Structures are given as C-alpha cells and as structure tokens.
Amino acid sequence: MTEKDKLLSIGKISKYTGAGIKALRYYERINLLKPLFIDPDSGYRYYSFEQTYLVYLIMFCVELDIPLRELTDFIGENDTINLKAFLTHGKNAADDKMKALERSIRFINIMEQAIALQEKHSMEQIYKRELPEKFYYLLPFEQTFDNVEQYEIMKLWENLPFDDYDDYEWLEYGLLCEHSQSGTKRYVFIEMPKGKENPECRIIPGGMYHCRQSDVSQIEQSTTIFSDYLTDKSSYTAIEVEVIFGKVDANKPINELRVL
C-alpha cells in the first residue's frame, strides 16, 4: 500500500466536511491546511482523516466571521493547534455575533411596528396619535425650510455629542419650528437615545399630537394646516420627521408633520 492509499483525496475531504474543493485549495494557499502528500505526477492533494477537524475549525471561523488570519495565531510549530485557546476565542466571537443578531432582530421589530402604525393613516389627512416624551438635540437653522436640502439635516450627525452608541434604534430626525408672538425659531434636530440625553437636549413632551403625512415638507404651512386646533394658542411647536412605509421611494420620503 502506497502512502497516498492511506490518505483521503481532496474530494473525500470535501465530502466528509462539506467544505468546497475551491475553499480547501484556498486554505492551502494561505497556509492553514497543508496536504500531507502531493502526488508528483498528478498534483493531486491528499490529507489525513485527522485533518478533518482542522477543516471544521476553519469553517467555524468562516461561519462566525472570524478572520482566518486569526486562526494562524493558534497554530504553532509542526502545525500544532492550541485548541483550548481557540475555542475560547471562538466562543467570545459567537457571543458577540449573537448579541449583534439580537440587536438586528429588535431593530427589525421596531421598523415593522413603525410601518404598521404609519400605514393606518391616509396621506394629507389629519389624525391624532399619542407619542412618548422624547429628547431632541437641536441646531439652529437660520433660514426658512421651504427649500431645505436633505444634507442640511444630515450634517447634524457630525455634531452629535456622543460617539459610543452601538445599538440599533429608530431615532427621529427632522425639522422643528417654535412659533410665538415674537416670531419663529427654526432648528434641525436628531433624537437622542434613551440614557444618552444631556443638558443641551430639548425635552419634547409626550401627549396626543395632531399629525399629517405628506410627500413634501409642509412645516412652514403648519399654522394653516392645523388652524382649527391652534386657535387658542399664542405659541406652539411644529415638528416634521421622516416616517417609513412598507414600500418607500428613497428619493421622495414621506414626512409626518406634528403639533401638540
């Protein structure tokens, strides 16, 4: 019996482990999985059965998005592997991935709930809905909102007073007008995550808001739109945010205009 007769061909290793032949050849190129024998005549690769567990470890890295170069940190002389250290590393990576998936699922649920809520209402019709207290970080805007470009709003992100928020949450952003007898003050804003609010934030009270959806900005017309509900108010705040629907046009977002 020749040496290669005691070994497994690359095809059999692929069949036993589920790793593709192209993948196995790539693992060889990056020095993670070296064949025990290469036929000098045919160039065919042969492996020992014991090497299947190394293939499983490599596939484990791929499944958990662990860079394969990190696996080389656990391979020593004569291709020995510090399996205990690697499994600890893999468990930590798996925990991180599970947490990321849980955050993603929470975000999907939030988005689905928001879509269901917005699609209950007709465009250009006034409706009421209750909103919780929110914290907005405001930046003054020194012109009317009639011709405001989206980038004027989004540049607010560059001025956020926090940089360690790593969870997914639907944070509102948009336009805000404070109307009073002395005039109108305009701001662009972004909602601050719970627990991240600071003294510079404006508290937006919770309560029953009058709202209206439109595919164009109408915040400058809020006094006219909600005239029936503002007759006894000498001052009020109008807020306009972008809302989401099941089908969206990225170039023409739907806005919700609100007054309390």
Image (cartoon, grey):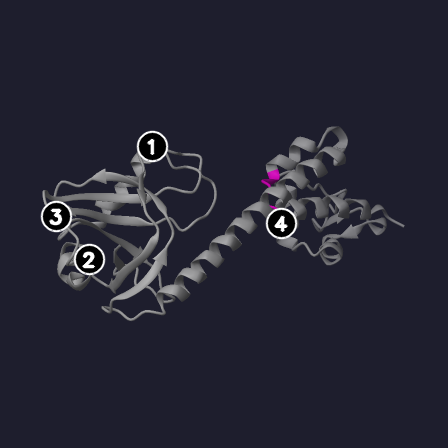
Let me know if residue 65 appears in the view: no
Asked whether 72 or 245 is in front, the reply is: 245
Q: Amino acid at mark 4?
A: Glu
Residue 7: percent from left, percent from top:
82, 49
Q: Amino acid at mark 1?
A: Pro
Magenta-drawn segment: 63-68
At mark 1, the secondary structure is: loop
Residue under the image location 60 percent in, 36 percent down: 69
Q: Earlier in the sequence, mark 3 or mark 2?
A: 3
Q: Earlier in the sequence, mark 1 or mark 2?
A: 1
Residue under the image location 43 percent in, 58 percent down: 111
Residue 233: percent from left, percent from top:
17, 53
- Label 4 to label 1: alpha-carbon separation: 44 Å
At mark 4, the secondary structure is: helix
Q: Amino acid at mark 3?
A: Thr
Q: Which mark is residue 144?
A: 3
In the image, residue 89 above or below residue 172: above
Where is mark 2, residue-wise? 217
Of tags 3 and 4, which is closer to the observer? 3
